[in-house]
């Protein structure tokens, strides 16, 4: 059953609604704004800019375009910067502005405008339209085969469409054409998806050693921190996230990464404090669920329900604005909402793209709806590439029976004993029962 809204939840939902809308900037007027999706694959900050520098860059572009309104390249840069603001700062009002700025750039210069096409690809990826992202990235690369953003977005789109072999080839090609932070981080992620954690870490460490701008340092250090957290290396994760926050104190992904590492080490109070700061600025399903589970694990069920209720509010607002949120819905609702809705959403996402993440989401949604026979092949699909993700291992272990159950639950808690405050405790309980 979907969680009901308490009085406090309703007030918080109103605050969330305000956070998810904003005044129009630059071209046109209002229109619907789309909440920023919780992207799986990473995306580097625009030209290595930190949070404050990105905002200043946007203001400078706006001032420039007031003086030079026919500068099509300026409009393309502004549109792409709006995408980055939405992604890094949780400001979804920028998506509609990005759309208008990029369309205006293409109206001014419809032929050979690879910057605007690359910006459109980045915008489509941010909205989880990965087919559209791949199409526009390819169009941009047909104009400029060396465009860094288009090369990076093509990798993202192929990954998110489950075309991992093609993504690996695209990463190799991008590395040969335009080596740099955006390409290095995608190159590392493709390696991690194949189970090559050592290779991914090596690529990222080299990229960090060569990074100079605060935005690049924050981004790469956070990516290393997230990688370490997924492997259960909480101390390393904390050091990397601290490095990121020293470079850019306003970088929200680093704050969330630090919270998860603190929770993994049992420092619940500081983890809760960090996640409260995250969701106040970036109220997306991932951190909302993480905070709710921390509350649930320490027995504060009312506070947990409040966070889970806000996930429902987010998905309704997002869907109303035309954003594909089926994966977010499936993951959150399976454990903390309407299980039938979780299954519908997971089936819809699986119909669009076959990735390890969508396979895991559908497997788990089938499980919570009592359909383990259908779920197990999908849980096995989710673990087929070698990607070391403890929640995937946990789901497969719960769904399976006999020796397979024991094996995969054991893998989950050995890999990352803090992958979920609720799930990790359940995995250990099931292992005790089996012993």
Image: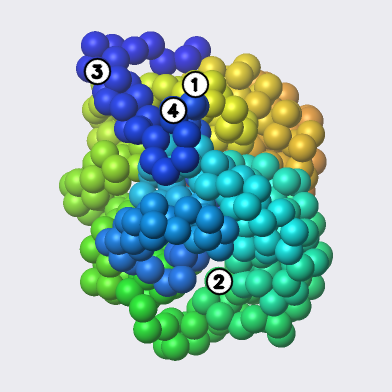
Disc 1/disc 3 C-alpha distance (Å): 16 Å
Question: Quadrant of the rendered structure where residue 3 is?
Answer: top left
* N-terminal-most mark, 1 or 2: 2
* N-terminal-most mark, 4 or 1: 4
Mark 2, residue position: 182
* N-terminal-most mark, 4 or 3: 3
Foreground mark, 4 or 3? 4
Mark 3, residue position: 11
Disc 3/disc 2 C-alpha distance (Å): 39 Å
Image location (x, y in percent) of residue 397:
63, 44
Does 42 sit left or right of 372 as displayed? Answer: left
Say which residue appears at 59% left-offset and 28% top-offset: 322
Say which residue appears at 42% left-offset and 43% top-offset: 26
Mark 4, residue position: 30
Does 183 sit left or right of 308 as displayed? Answer: right
Mark 1, residue position: 316
- Label 3 sits on a secondary structure element that is helix
Residue 205 seen in render: yes
Q: Residues within 10 Å of mark 3 (few under 14, many from 20)?
A: few
* N-terminal-most mark, 2 or 4: 4
- Label 4 sits on a secondary structure element that is loop
Say which residue appears at 77% left-offset and 37% top-offset: 352
Image location (x, y in percent) of residue 342:
60, 24
């Amino acid at each position: 059953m979907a969680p009901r809204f308490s009085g406090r939840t309703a007030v918080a939902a109103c605050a969330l609604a305000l956070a998810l809308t904003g005044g129009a900037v630059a071209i046109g007027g209002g229109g619907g704004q789309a909440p920023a999706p919780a992207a799986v694959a990473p995306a580097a900050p625009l030209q290595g800019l930190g949070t404050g520098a990105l905002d200043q860059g946007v203001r400078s572009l706006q001032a420039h375009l007031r003086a030079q309104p026919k500068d099509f390249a300026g409009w393309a840069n502004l549109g792409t910067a709006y995408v980055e603001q939405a992604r890094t700062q949780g400001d979804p009002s920028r998506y509609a502005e990005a759309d208008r700025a990029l369309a205006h750039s293409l109206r001014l210069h419809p032929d050979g405008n690879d910057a605007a096409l690359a910006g459109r690809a980045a915008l489509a990826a941010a909205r989880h339209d990965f087919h559209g992202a791949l199409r526009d990235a390819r169009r941009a690369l047909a104009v400029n085969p060396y465009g860094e953003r288009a090369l990076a977005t093509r990798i993202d789109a192929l990954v998110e469409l489950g075309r991992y072999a093609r993504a690996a080839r695209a990463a190799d090609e991008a590395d040969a054409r335009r080596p740099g932070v955006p390409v290095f981080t995608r190159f590392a992620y493709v390696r991690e998806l194949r189970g090559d954690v050592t290779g991914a870490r090596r690529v990222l460490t080299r990229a960090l050693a060569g990074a100079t701008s605060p935005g690049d340092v924050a981004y790469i250090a956070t990516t290393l921190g997230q990688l370490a957290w997924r492997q259960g290396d909480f101390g390393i994760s904390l050091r990397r996230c601290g490095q990121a926050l020293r470079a850019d104190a306003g970088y929200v992904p680093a704050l969330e990464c630090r919270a998860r590492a603190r929770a993994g080490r049992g420092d619940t109070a500081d983890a809760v404090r960090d996640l409260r700061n995250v969701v106040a600025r970036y109220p997306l399903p991932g951190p909302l669920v993480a905070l709710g589970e921390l509350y649930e694990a320490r027995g504060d069920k009312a506070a947990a329900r409040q966070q889970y209720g806000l996930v429902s509010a987010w998905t309704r607002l997002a869907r109303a604005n035309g954003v594909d949120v089926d994966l977010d819905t499936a993951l959150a609702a399976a454990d903390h909402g309407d299980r039938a809705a979780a299954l519908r959403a997971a089936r819809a996402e699986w119909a669009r793209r076959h990735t390890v993440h969508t396979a895991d989401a559908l497997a788990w949604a089938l499980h919570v709806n009592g359909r383990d026979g259908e779920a197990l092949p999908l849980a096995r699909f989710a673990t087929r590439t070698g990607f070391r993700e403890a929640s995937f291992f946990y789901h497969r272990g719960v769904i399976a029976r006999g020796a397979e159950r024991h094996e995969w639950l054991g893998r989950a808690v050995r890999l990352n004993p803090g992958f979920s405050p609720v799930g990790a405790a359940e995995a250990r309980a099931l292992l005790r029962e089996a012993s």
